[in-house]
């Protein structure tokens, strides 16, 4: 399975180098060891391979269940390090899978908005904060702009666009002595999302620009 991941990764690194105008800042901020939870704003379907191409570690992803259509497509996505997560029902298996990734000191990427929101960040879901609180993994914020211009999913291998990726400083959330309440998870989520918002222009910050201006 790793062979397919690295083959796809090689293609995207070459494609972003030759076909796009990609600017990446903060690569030196990426911890190279230990469990790492990467959080990013979500502009387009191109964001997962973009993150994988910019982070100098293998990256696993939680992805929406609707992408895993049929056994062949499902096998390909799982081989690329992706695992399905549902928006409409409990996600015990995906949560267990995510903790397993982090417990093995690997890196996992989550888009806390849970869906694409081009040019306007929306309120983050609580799952990323729950994983961070229970796993105690380092959290790495990433801000993405420009990937929304890549267009349809068929253009992902050919990313003709100006794209900017800013990688922030890794941080940890305050240690939790017990399972955090929903109110605590909301507070942690907003703090994590604001770390992402700080990495992108105001016109992309959406909900988190308005929240900071209140």
Image (spheres, grey):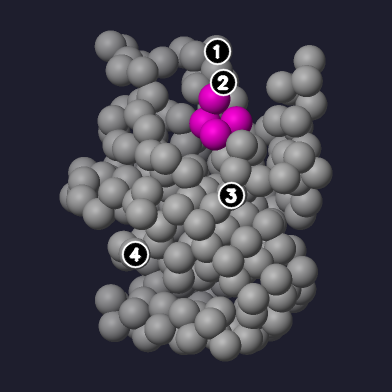
SS type, badge 3: strand
SS type, badge 2: helix
Residue at numbered disc 1: 183
Q: Quadrant of the C terminus?
A: top right
Which is more foreground, mark 1 or mark 3?
Answer: 3
The range drawn in magenta is 191-195
Residue 186: assigned label: 2
The first of marks 1 and 3 along the sequence is: 3
* Above or below, comparing residue 131 to residue 159 in the picture: above
Q: Residue at x 37, y 49 (%)?
A: 29
- State how far apart marks 4 and 3 are (Cα): 16 Å
Q: Residues within 10 Å of mark 4 (few under 14, many from 20)?
A: few
Given residues 32 and 93, the one toward you in this image is 32
Residue at numbered disc 3: 143
Count of marks placed on residues = 4
Q: Are marks 1 and 2 in contact (CB under 8 Å)?
A: yes
The first of marks 2 and 3 along the sequence is: 3
């Amino acid at each position: 399975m790793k062979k397919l991941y690295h083959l796809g990764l090689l293609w995207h690194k070459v494609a972003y180098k030759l076909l796009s105008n990609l600017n990446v800042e903060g690569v030196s901020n990426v911890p190279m060891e230990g469990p790492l939870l990467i959080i990013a704003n979500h502009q387009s379907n191109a964001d997962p391979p973009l993150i994988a191409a910019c982070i100098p570690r293998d990256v696993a992803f939680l992805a929406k269940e609707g992408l895993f259509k049929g056994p062949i497509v499902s096998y390909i996505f799982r081989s690329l390090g992706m695992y399905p997560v549902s928006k409409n029902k409990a996600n015990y298996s995906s949560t267990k899978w995510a903790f397993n990734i982090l417990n093995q000191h690997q890196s996992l990427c989550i888009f806390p908005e849970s869906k694409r929101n081009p040019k306007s960040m929306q309120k983050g879901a609580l799952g990323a904060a729950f994983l961070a609180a229970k796993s105690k993994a380092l959290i790495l914020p990433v801000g993405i702009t420009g990937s929304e211009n890549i267009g349809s999913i068929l253009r992902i291998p050919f990313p003709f666009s100006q794209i900017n990726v800013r990688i922030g400083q890794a941080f940890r959330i305050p240690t939790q002595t017990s399972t955090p309440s929903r109110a605590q998870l909301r507070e942690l989520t907003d703090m994590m999302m604001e770390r992402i918002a700080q990495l992108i222009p105001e016109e992309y910050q959406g909900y988190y620009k308005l929240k900071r201006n209140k």
